Image: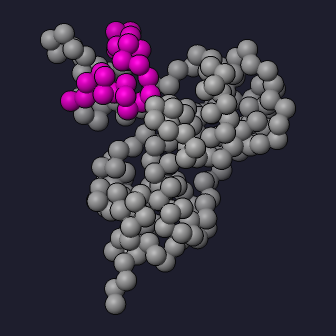
Amino acid sequence: MTTISEYAAQHGISPRRARALAQQGRLPARRVGRAWVLDEGVATTPAVSTRPMSERTRRLFLRALSDQTVREVTGSDRRRIAAYLGRLRASDRPAALIRAWFRGADLPTGFTLGELLVRAALEHQDDVVAERLARPQRRYLNSPERLARVVADERAIHGLSRAQLADRAGTTPGDVAAVEAGRPVDTMLTVLRVVNALDVRPLALPTGAVRDSA
């Protein structure tokens, strides 16, 4: 079981907010004594709100949306921004989500990917936003360090634990941990399974990601 406080910490929201979601029936939690708990594996989708983002969160989100990575974000901010990106990618109406999150905000004037997508959403160019977000995540993973960073970032955006990603990729949590640490694994097939499970299409893979069999 997962406590409501643990869930809140994992998904970058306050325990008070998580308890409110449970009480409203928006989180599949149940009472055990005086505590709220979630059964293991039940609540894997982060509780991202459709309320407007704060100005600070908008800045962090725009940078992450532009780079398609959360590597510049740490702590609870990283979990929260990863959850926003994950929900946006999974939505069948991503432009509507952006409009909700940026309600009341000034129209971005820059030309980064994030600013262009937010501007398109606020101007109701919904097809433009949906088409861009539906494109495969194509990445140059030409070093163990870059591979490690992309796998860790994408796992956070997908809201997966290492065990969940390993199960999806048909490998072990130890292999996932090794890839994220920049350590070699036994075969390139393992690397491919991990990145494919995250919907990443590698344009290059590092030879150093595999142990030398000699």
Taking the magenta stretch, the answer to whether it contains residue 17 is yes
In this view, the residue in front, 36 or 73, is 73
Residue at image point 36% right, 58% down: 176
Tell me: residue 125, above or below residue 50: below
- Report if residue 127 is visible in the image: no
**Which residue does the image show at 62% across and 40% down from the upper left?**
64
Q: Which residue is drawn at 31% across and 22% down?
A: 5
Locate the C terminus and report the quarter of the image it occupies: bottom left
Q: Position of residue 182 (x, y in %)?
A: 43, 64
Query: Number of callouts in the render?
Result: 0
Horizontal and vertical percent for residue 106?
A: 79, 21
- In the picture, measured across the screen, residue 61 lies left or right of residue 109, that is left
Residue 143 drawn above or below residue 18: below
Identity of the residue furthest to the right in this view: 109
Residue with the most extreme left position: 33
Q: From the viewer's perspective, is residue 152 above or below residue 88?
A: below
Chosen colour scheme:
one colour
Span shown in magenta: 1-25
Residue 6 image point, x, y percent: 30, 28
Q: Does the magenta stretch include residue 35?
A: no
- Quadrant of the rendering where the N terminus is positioned: top left
